[in-house]
């Protein structure tokens, strides 16, 4: 029997893979709706993936699927999608206001 | 304008106060529903509060109210409630299965 909950400390640092099984990076942080407590975005760090730097990429939580065999999350994203995706340097975290969140969600078709 | 989301890294370590403004401890971790991404419990570390040790206390997320003036969360709990509350040592994290979660929720009248 497995638990239905997972700790934030456990999620942070978990590897992220694409659908082909290639490691893209890892989860750096979670963005949580203050009022409801709903996790809205997993902030991923993609380092050294096909020349993509170590910027942070907010990905809608619903896009992540946990895969037991890989002990990591799988996201259905390819290189072209990541290259154009919303991102920021770790020392310039944006205000996740309505406009920013709307832009991220639209990019991923949410 | 403030953001409606907050990062898990920011929540972890945030102070927790009782309704009287006394510091009880701080948030150590968050327990998140794997499927929905909903934060179910804030795991609080209450250290040295009136003789209560440094065990971890899972508190239903809905009980936490953020207070801007204190830059921390306020929970409506007194010493007697904490003394009888579900807790565990940090190196013996329980399986948050249906039974455990039900016990925690019932204790706090959820």
Image (cartoon, coloured by chain):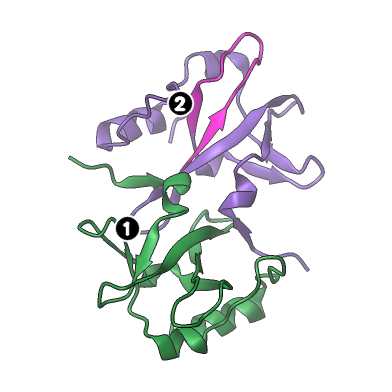
Chain colours: A green, B purple
Specify the subunit that label 1 lies on: B
Contact flag, marks 1 and 2 (Cβ < 8 Å): no
Q: Indicate the position of residue A49 as horizontal and vertical percent values.
A: 44, 77
Choose the circle earlier in sequence order: 1 or 2: 1
Quarter-wise, where is residue A94 in the image? bottom right
Give how far apart the Cα atoms at labels 1 and 2 are.
Answer: 25 Å
Going 60% across and 25% down the picture, which residue do you hit? Answer: B77
The numbered mark at residue B90 is 2
Mark 1 or 2: in front is 2
Q: In which quarter of the image is the N terminus of chain B?
A: bottom right
B59 is within the stretch colored magenta? no
- Relative to A90, say whether A14 is above or below: above
Q: How many labels does the image show?
A: 2
Provide residue A89's location: percent of width, then percent of height.
66, 72
Which secondary structure, mark 1? loop
Checking the image for residue B35, the label placed there is 1
């Amino acid at each position: 029997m497995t638990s239905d909950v997972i700790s934030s400390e456990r999620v942070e640092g978990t590897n992220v893979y694409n659908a082909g099984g290639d490691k893209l990076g890892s989860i750096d942080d979670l963005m949580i709706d203050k009022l409801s407590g709903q996790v809205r975005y997993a902030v991923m760090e993609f380092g050294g993936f096909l020349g993509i730097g170590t910027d942070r990429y907010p990905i809608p939580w619903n896009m992540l699927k946990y895969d037991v065999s890989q002990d990591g999350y799988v996201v259905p994203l390819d290189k072209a999608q990541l290259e154009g995706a919303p991102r920021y340097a770790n020392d310039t975290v944006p205000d996740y206001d309505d406009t920013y969140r709307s832009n991220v969600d639209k990019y991923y078709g949410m």
